Image (tube, coloured by chain):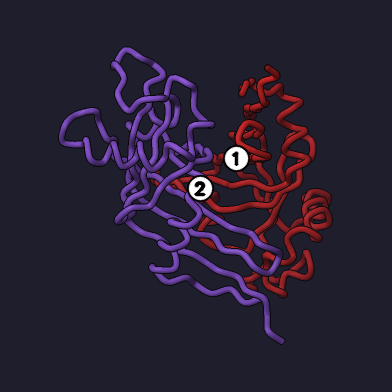
Chain colours: A red, B purple
Amino acid sequence: MHIHAMTNKECVDALARLGFGRLGCARDNQPYVVPMYFTYHEGHLYTFSTAGQKIEWMRANPRVCVEADEITNPDQWLSVVVFGDYEELPDTPEYEFERNLAYKILRQRVMWWEPASVASPHHSAADSLAPVFYRIHIDQVTGHHATPDRS
Amino acid sequence: MHIHAMTNKECVDALARLGFGRLGCARDNQPYVVPMYFTYHEGHLYTFSTAGQKIEWMRANPRVCVEADEITNPDQWLSVVVFGDYEELPDTPEYEFERNLAYKILRQRVMWWEPASVASPHHSAADSLAPVFYRIHIDQVTGHHATPDRS
C-alpha cells in the first residue's frame, strides 16, 4: 500500500463527488461530531439542518472541521479533512442566491433526513423545525489517498 | 420513517458491532475529525495510532467525541455519539493488560492502516512510528435509529 498526500484539486474533486462526511464542531473545547450531507460550490460546502445542538454550538464558535472518506478496500481508500468556518445564510434578500443554491441542490439528498415540515425554503421564525441554511467556508483542505502496491 | 432515541444498551451494542467511526478532538476550540477503528470493552473504546496531530491534540485536551453510524438505506439508519476522555495506555507494567487488549483485538483490523513498523506492541521511545495505545473512557452515549414506516 502506498499513501500519498492529495493535491488541492484532488481534495476538492473528492468533496464534490462524495457529498457526505462528518462535521465536527466544538464548545468549550468539547468536540461534537455528526453526519452531514453537503454540496461543494466555489470554496464552500452548502447544507442545512433543523435547529439544535450543533447549530447552537456553531453559532457560538464558528470553527469547524469536515472529514469525508471513501474506503474501497483495505489498501485503497481516501480521507479528506477540511478546516473552515460556519457561515449562516439568513432568510434575507441578500442571501437569496446562496439559500436557493443550498436548498435546490440539497433537496434530493437530505429530504429523508429531515422532518416533513422542511418542504419549503421559507418558514416563520417561530417554527422550531424551520431549516437553518448554512455553508462552511473552506480555509484549508488536506487529504490522503492509499493505493495498492503494484509489485 | 420513524426516528427513535436508542437505549444505552442499543448504543453499546451498536458500538461493539460497528467497531469503526470518526473521532473528534479539539485544540483552542478548533475541532479535528479523523476515521478511527476501535473495540468496545467495558465502557471504553480501545485503539491505537502512530504519533501525530490528533495524539498531540488529545494529550493537550482529552475531551473527545466519537460518532459511529450505519446507513442501510434512506429510511433505515442509526447514528451513535459518544462523549468521553482520552486515556493513554503507556508502555509500563501496570498498563500491560490494557495495552495487550488494544493490541490483540485491534491487530487484524488496523494493520492495513498503519506502517509496517507497527508490528509489535513494544517500541523504543525514540521510534517516531511507535504506536500510541489509548482508550476513550465513555462519559455519555446517545443514539438515534430510523426505521421505515409500516403503513
Give the label, 1 or 2, closer to the camera: 2
Image coordinates of residue B91 in percent, x first then y, are 24, 28
Residue name at image x 70 percent, y 71 percent: A124
Which residue type carries mark 2? Phe
The residues tagged by marks 1 and 2 sit, at their Cα atoms, a distance apart of 14 Å
**Along the line of sight, the residue nearer the viewer: B81 or A45:** B81
Instruction: Depth check: give the residue in front, A24 or B45.
Output: B45
Q: Residue furthest bottom?
A: B151
Report if residue B71 is visible in the image.
Answer: yes
Q: Position of residue B96 (x, y in %)?
A: 22, 35
Amino acid tagged 1: Glu
Q: Chain of mark 2?
A: B
So how many labels did they put on this image? Answer: 2
Q: Position of residue A44 (x, y in %)?
A: 72, 39
Residue located beneath label 1 in the image: A67
Q: Tag 1, which chain?
A: A
Q: Residues within 10 Å of mark 2 (few under 14, many from 20)?
A: some
Residue A142 in sight here: no
Residue B83 percent coordinates (x, y): 39, 53
**Residue at 43%, 56% in the rendered image:** B16
| B130, above or below B140, in the image | above
Would you place residue B98 above or below residue B54 in this image?
A: below
Quadrant holding the C terminus of chain B:
bottom right
Quadrant of residue B1 within the rendered picture: bottom right
Q: Can you tell which quarter of the image residue A147 is in?
A: top right
| Residue drawn at the location 42% of the way across and 71% of the way down | B7
- Dot label at residue B20: 2
